[in-house]
């Protein structure tokens, strides 16, 4: 074979190499889709074991948010003063819309979904380690040599091509063994000088099976077992997070409306003080009031105006923060639906603290995780104890040589060899394994304490939740009475002022008490609503829909 033939061979290898690079660069999408498909499969497989897990879980980012479907705010609110037109044309977002936006666009929510996805990827790899793993590799070389023939005073140039390749399969058995098979071949062809071509092949199979250390399904499959359980824990944690997330989104929603209501109440109080100042000024000019009384009313008016301005600032800030919480830009022109606040009612749970605690012990997903993790710690003691044993492995291997020749070699099963025996490693130095075993014992004791602590914390959450509910209910009842009393006091003091019998101090106090009572009533109503949702969440019975909205609990409360 001449130099031209050599160039042809090189050009073919270059073509194959470039084609491989192109195929590799085009396959990234395939790898991504393959990973997504496997991760989705393992999540779907375990989802039925976790109540209220999202059955359509996906980490694919939602499309860019569109506000076209939401109604437009057309009313200019007077309680924002000169800036009342800022909200005109904004999109009105209901609580259900807000929950849906948060589930689709919240950065924090997306992060938690991706953590679960990564846990699923870990399981796919752990399962893959126990599947047959195939490998193919090879190589080719062109070599040139000058040799001196024996007895001949001359130099001969030889150029030849060598190639080798192998294909194999390796499988880790769930009882601790490893099975492997490999077929390899070598090929040499002279392209200058000696026209010979030679080839050889070898088929090898081997088995390694631990008999003591590392033997048995329980020990050998520990990594896979833990990966399976870790994904289950991840599903429970994410489901628990969905409940917490919806409650916090709703809590923040009501918080923004509460701040908006504070603006409204302070504005109305400010307007009332302005009317009072005008009346007092008229009385003062007629000599019916001292200047000090007018100044006192003016000072109260300025203080109320300052509180109103601060309430507007707090509201604007809370709304911007809520936009970020939903995953929106702070530039998004949205307002929250005022009617959501007006529709709130005191719905007090009709269950006792003891009943709620019993339900939580049976329903809390995080408690299931604590119990199972305590089992993990106990199981790992056996794994650590197994590492203290001697290494005794049964090994066996067989090989078949190929028939040599100028063509592709074939295996000759008449030319075989085999061997079998034991590999032994006595447990002379086991300091590291001893420490690992002792650490496993400590970890188990710690896990049992963590389980006890988790149970106590859940009981504490239920008790605190009930106390918060009861306090918010009583606060609302008190504030309702307070609003009624304050309204009567304001009416009385205004009437007395019109008749010239009241004092500026009494009127100021009555007006301020009315503003404060209305704010306290809204605060108590929102606090009770949020506390009720958290109470159901802490009991583990708050069921969340795909759009983040919770399912109403029937027969759960009373007016």
Image (spheres, rainbow, N blue to C red):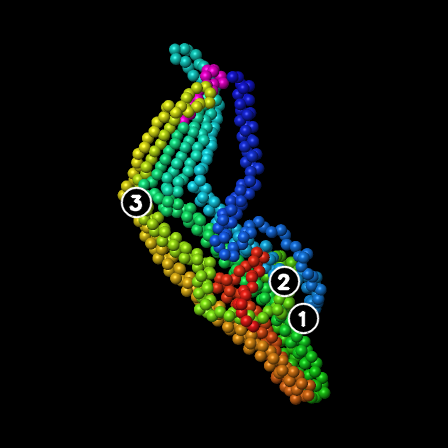
The crowd level at tag 3 (other Cα within 10 Å; few <14, some 14-19, many 20+) is some
The crowd level at tag 2 (other Cα within 10 Å; few <14, some 14-19, many 20+) is some
| 48 sits to left or right of 318 | left
> Is residue 221 inside the magenta stretch?
no
Residue at x-position 63% and y-position 86%: 503
Question: Which segment is the magenta one?
Answer: 189-202
Mark 3 lies on a secondary structure that is loop
Q: Sequence-wise, which precedes: disc 2 or disc 3?
A: 2
Would you place residue 403 above or below residue 335 in this image?
Answer: above
Residue that mark 1 sits on = 79
Most common secondary structure along the magenta stretch: strand
> Is residue 200 inside the magenta stretch?
yes
Check contact, mark 1 vs mark 2: CB within 8 A: no
Residue 311 percent location from the top left of the image: 61, 70
Residue 125 percent location from the top left of the image: 46, 44
Mark 1 lies on a secondary structure that is helix
Residue that mark 2 sits on = 94
- Res 363 visible: yes
What residue occupies the far top of the structure in this picture? 152
């Amino acid at each position: 074979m001449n130099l031209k033939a050599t160039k042809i061979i090189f050009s073919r290898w270059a073509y194959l190499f470039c084609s491989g690079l192109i195929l590799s660069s085009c396959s990234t999408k395939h790898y991504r889709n393959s990973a997504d498909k496997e991760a989705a499969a393992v999540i779907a497989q375990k989802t039925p074991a976790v109540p209220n897990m999202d059955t359509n879980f996906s980490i694919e980012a939602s499309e860019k948010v569109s506000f076209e479907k939401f109604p437009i705010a057309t009313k200019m609110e007077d309680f924002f003063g000169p800036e009342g037109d800022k909200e005109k044309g904004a999109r009105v977002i209901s609580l259900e819309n807000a929950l849906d936006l948060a589930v689709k666009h919240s950065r924090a929510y997306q992060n938690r979904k991706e953590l679960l996805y990564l846990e699923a990827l870990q399981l796919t790899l752990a399962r893959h380690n126990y599947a047959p793993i195939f490998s193919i590799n090879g190589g080719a070389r062109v070599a040139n040599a000058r040799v001196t023939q024996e007895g001949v005073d001359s130099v001969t140039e030889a150029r030849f091509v060598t190639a080798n390749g192998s294909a194999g399969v390796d499988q880790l058995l769930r009882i601790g063994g490893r099975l492997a098979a490999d077929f390899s071949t070598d090929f040499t062809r002279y392209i200058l000088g000696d026209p010979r071509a030679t080839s050889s092949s070898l088929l090898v199979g081997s088995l390694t099976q631990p008999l003591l250390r590392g033997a048995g399904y329980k020990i050998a499959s520990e990594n896979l077992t833990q990966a399976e359980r870790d994904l289950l824990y991840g599903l429970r944690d994410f489901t628990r997070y969905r409940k917490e997330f919806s409650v916090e989104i709703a809590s923040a929603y009501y918080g923004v409306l509460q701040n908006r209501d504070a603006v409204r109440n302070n504005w109305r109080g400010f307007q009332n003080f302005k009317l009072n100042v005008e009346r007092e000024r008229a009385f003062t000019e007629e000599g019916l009031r001292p200047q000090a009384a007018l100044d006192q009313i003016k000072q109260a008016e300025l203080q109320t105006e300052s509180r109103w301005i601060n309430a507007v600032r707090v509201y604007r800030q809370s709304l911007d923060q809520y936009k970020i919480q939903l995953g929106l830009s702070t530039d998004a022109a949205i307002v929250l639906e005022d009617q959501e606040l007006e529709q709130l009612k005191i719905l007090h749970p009709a269950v006792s603290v003891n009943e709620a605690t019993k339900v939580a012990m049976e329903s809390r997903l995080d408690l299931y995780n604590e119990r199972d993790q305590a089992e993990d710690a106990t199981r790992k003691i056996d794994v650590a104890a197994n590492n203290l044993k001697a290494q005794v492995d049964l090994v066996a291997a067989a090989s078949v040589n190929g028939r040599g020749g100028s063509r592709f070699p074939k295996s000759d099963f008449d030319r075989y060899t085999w061997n079998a025996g034991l590999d032994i490693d006595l447990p002379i130095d086991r300091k590291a394994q001893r420490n690992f075993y002792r650490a496993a014992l400590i970890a188990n004791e710690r896990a049992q304490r963590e389980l006890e602590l988790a149970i106590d914390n859940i009981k504490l959450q239920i008790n605190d939740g009930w106390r918060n509910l009861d306090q918010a209910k009583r606060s609302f009842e008190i504030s309702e009475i307070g609003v009624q009393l304050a309204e009567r006091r304001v009416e009385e003091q205004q009437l007395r002022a019109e008749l010239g019998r009241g004092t500026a101090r009494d009127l100021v106090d009555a007006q301020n008490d009315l503003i404060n009572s209305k704010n306290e009533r809204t605060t108590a109503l929102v606090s009770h609503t949020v506390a009720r949702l958290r109470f159901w969440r802490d009991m583990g019975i708050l069921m969340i829909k795909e759009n983040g909205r919770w399912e109403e609990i029937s027969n759960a409360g009373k007016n």
